[in-house]
Amino acid sequence: MLCQKVGVSLQTENRMRGRAVVAHRAHNPEVVGSNPAPATFFLYRLIVILQTKSSALRPMDNQKNISINDNSAAKHADSSVKVSVIENTGRVISSTGSFYTVKCEDGQTFNCVVKGKFRTMGIKTTNPVAVGDMVHFVCMKGNQYGQIDRIDDRKNCIIRKSVNLSKQYSVIASNIDMAYLIVSCKNPQTDTMFIDRFLVTANAYNVPCSIIINKTDIYDSQAQQYAGFLIDIYENIGYNVFLTSAVTGTGLEKLRKDMSGKICLFSGNSGVGKSSLINLFCPDAKQKTADISATYLKGKHTTTFAAMFTNGDINIIDTPGIKSFGMADFKREELALYFPEMKERLQDCKYYNCTHTHEPHCAIKKAAKTGEIHYQRYNNYIKLLNAEDMSPLE
Ligand SMILES: Nc1nc2c(ncn2[C@@H]2O[C@H](COP(=O)(O)OP(=O)(O)OP(=O)(O)O)[C@@H](O)[C@H]2O)c(=O)[nH]1
Ligand SMILES: [Mg+2]
Ligand SMILES: [Zn+2]
């Protein structure tokens, strides 16, 4: 049976028989995201050999029969092997960091690994492949496992600095039509610095953003006041702000309309209700949710890897909760460009390299004084300008 599925010769199958059972278990779609069985790794290695040993993989037609019978292949399978290799493309819909689920246009999904060399191709991020990426991969006919060998150029992405590796960045997701930053005004309360760090980074990488203020059903007057404060700041500078409750359903219809036809990203602190909202929009998602900690009133980082869910014309990427959002790699001088209300006033500053801190005739400082630029945004700009994770002024 394995013979027919992957086109491996009978002689070879007999040698692999001990592993064949495991391979069949690995065919079970339930294992999406789990470690492939040893036999599967054997098959991956075969693909690598096939690729390196034969430039026979010419982009002619989709399916090829390749025969190998040489010394290096013999290390792995010492007989003539015939394998049908298929080249395929699809979108990465989940990532554990080592394994990726790729969905093709016809809806079929494949469990993929990344070709070894790929990680050392000068990509500084901790994860070369991210959810949302359009990738090319090879797999064997009838097999649900593949190996990614190329990523299409990204239209945009959300990048954040890794918590422990100061010089490394991780791509949260790519090719996003709208990133929704989910915040809460209570249990947990999201601060404006977190919001601004996210918005600035998204802006720097061309990702349009909206804000969702969730958990409105539990707001007391203080939390309601804070929600009003956030709406005042962010609607005034052009961001859409949605008020929702995953418990009562408030605001969900309006949000659903906004998400229609888009690839959406849900990001935010742990415990703000990202997965709970996704479960309502995409019931098949069945994402795990958990109560926030009673002691710290914060989330417990329930979602551990990014995954995209689809329901009709809505696609939402759920992501792990973020504690703090490290700034992406851009120069301090550029910072004001990513504050839309500052960007539109830059030409009125006297000095072209104005940092909007101490310089005379600064249009930004003036607007902050009159309240045209919200004081909280200006304060956050100053804090960010001096933040340790920003590159020094040139
Ligand atoms: N009252 C209330 N509780 C909510 C709402 N949305 C989510 N919750 C609860 O908040 C807790 C955290 O929700 P999750 O959906 O797990 O939060 P998350 O943002 O996905 O958290 P992480 O996966 O840790 O990043 C759960 O107990 C949910 O039931 C809401 O609108 N109102
Ligand atoms: Mg979650
Ligand atoms: Zn200025």
Image (tube, grey):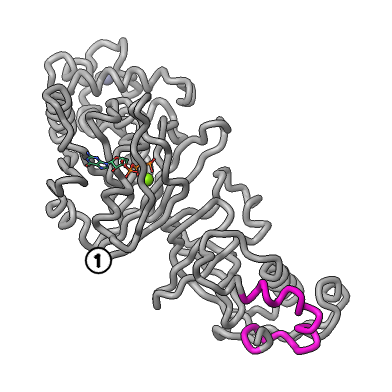
Left or right of 294? Residue 5 is right
- For label 1, being within 8 Å of ligand 1 is answered no
> Residue 286 is drawn in which quadrant?
bottom left
Q: Which residue is at 57% across, 43% downward?
A: 124
Q: How many marks?
A: 1
Q: Which residue is at 58% across, 33% downward?
A: 165
| Residue segment shown in magenta | 4-24
Return the x and y of residue 328 as percentages of the image width and height.
44, 35
Return the x and y of residue 310 as percentages of the image width and height.
32, 63
Q: Nearer the viewer, residue 130 or 76?
A: 76
> Residue 140 is drawn in which quadrant?
bottom right
Q: Which residue is at 15% across, 37% downward?
A: 217
Q: Amino acid at mark 1?
A: Asp
Return the x and y of residue 9 as percentages of the image width and height.
75, 88
Q: Nearer the viewer, residue 180 or 203?
A: 180
Left or right of 87? Residue 234 is left
Q: Principal SS element in the magenta part? A: helix
Callout 1: helix, strand or loop? loop
> Is 12 covered by the magenta stretch?
yes
Return the x and y of residue 253 as percentages of the image width and height.
13, 54
Q: Which residue is at 20% across, 24% downward?
A: 348
In terms of image quarters, where does ligand 2 lie?
Answer: top left
The answer to whether 104 is drawn above or below residue 215 in the figure is below
- Quadrant (top left, top right, bottom left, bottom right) of the N terminus: bottom right
Q: Residues within 10 Å of mark 1 (few under 14, many from 20)?
A: few
Q: Nearer the viewer, residue 273 or 202?
A: 273
Q: Residue furthest right?
A: 71
> Is 114 covered by the magenta stretch?
no
The residue labelled by disc 1 is 313
